[in-house]
Image (spheres, rainbow, N blue to C red):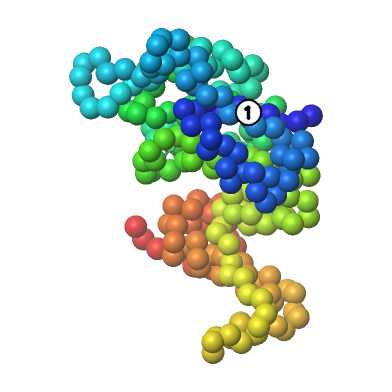
Amino acid sequence: MTWRASVLTLFPGMFPGPLGQSLAGRGLDDGLWSLQAQDIRAVATDRHRKVDDTPFGGGAGMVMRPDIVDAALALVADERPAIYLTPRGRPLTQARIRDLAAGPGVVLLCGRFEGVDERVIAARALEEISIGDYVLSGGEPAALVLLDACVRLLPGVMGAADSAGEESFSPGPWAGLLEYPHYTRPAEWQGRTVPDVLLSGHHGAIATWRLAEAQRITRERRPDLWAAYHQAHAAAVASPPPAP
Ligand code: ADE
């Protein structure tokens, strides 16, 4: 069964964009997933095809009208989860991506202007998701991020090019750790060498080195992830996390 994505946007030309390339693009061509970019403006009926209006209560910017957004959703809505991409949403996680990829697909609403009238969010029970604590000019790049993360998990999209078992945010031995450093040929480049252990052929020693490096990098860069990892693996971790 094809995994189906519908995106409601004022800029349908932004899709598939980068998802038309590489593995996601091949998966799209092969029918492993489908993408429908629905122009929200297509449902605007007035002469000027207005989709937004000034906010009640005053203030800067424009708000997308509930009747317009509802009519656009009515064109595509079905049993798939309907998601509104907004910086005030719950943070996107790999766990949510896994669940979405395992389902029938997604309906994504991309906002522009100051946002979307609250009533259509409530009426359609939209799930609000953020891709991070920064503000984009619209939800489209966030929709592309969410779709990319889902599509690479679909059966047949990645092939053997990737092992989901060795990922930072997936269950397994590397759960909760950032990636260890990678090296390839040449063995010496601009005077920089490769750690001896990786050339030693000792698989046990290599695994131990990689785990220690993943732990060091996580401890240095992500105290939040390190604290959670340390709690889950207290016995296996050499040093305690640094004091806050
Ligand atoms: N729209 C604008 N900024 C966003 C963000 N950080 N995440 C999701 N949607 C957005």
Whether residue 28 is situated above or below residue 203 in the rendered picture: above
Is the C terminus in the top left, top right, bottom left or bottom right quadrant?
A: bottom left
Q: Position of residue 172 (x, y in %)?
A: 68, 52
Residue 109 visible in the current orientation: yes
Q: Position of residue 186 (x, y in %)?
A: 66, 83
Which quadrant of the picture is home to ligand 1? top left
Residue 89 visible in the current orientation: no
Q: Secondary structure at mark 1?
A: strand
Q: What residue sits 47% from the left and 20% below the top?
A: 41
143 left or right, relative to 5:
left
Image quadrant where residue 238 sits? bottom right
Q: Position of residue 159 (x, y in %)?
A: 78, 51
Closest to the observer: 8 or 2?
A: 8
Q: What residue sits 33% from the left and 21% below the top?
A: 63
Whether residue 153 is situated above or below residue 217 in the rendered picture: above
Closest to the observer: 5 or 221?
A: 5
- Which residue ends up furthest to the left in the rendered image? 58
Q: What residue sits 38% from the left and 15% below the top?
A: 48
64 left or right, relative to 102:
left
Disc 1 crowd rating (10 Å Cα; few below 14, some 14-19, many 20+) is some
Closest to the observer: 138 or 14?
A: 14
Image quadrant where residue 31 sits? top right
Give the number of callouts. 1
Image quadrant where residue 78 sits? top right
Q: Which residue is mark 1?
A: 36
Q: What residue sits 62% from the left and 43% below the top?
A: 19
User: What type is the residue that disc 1 sits on?
Assistant: Gln
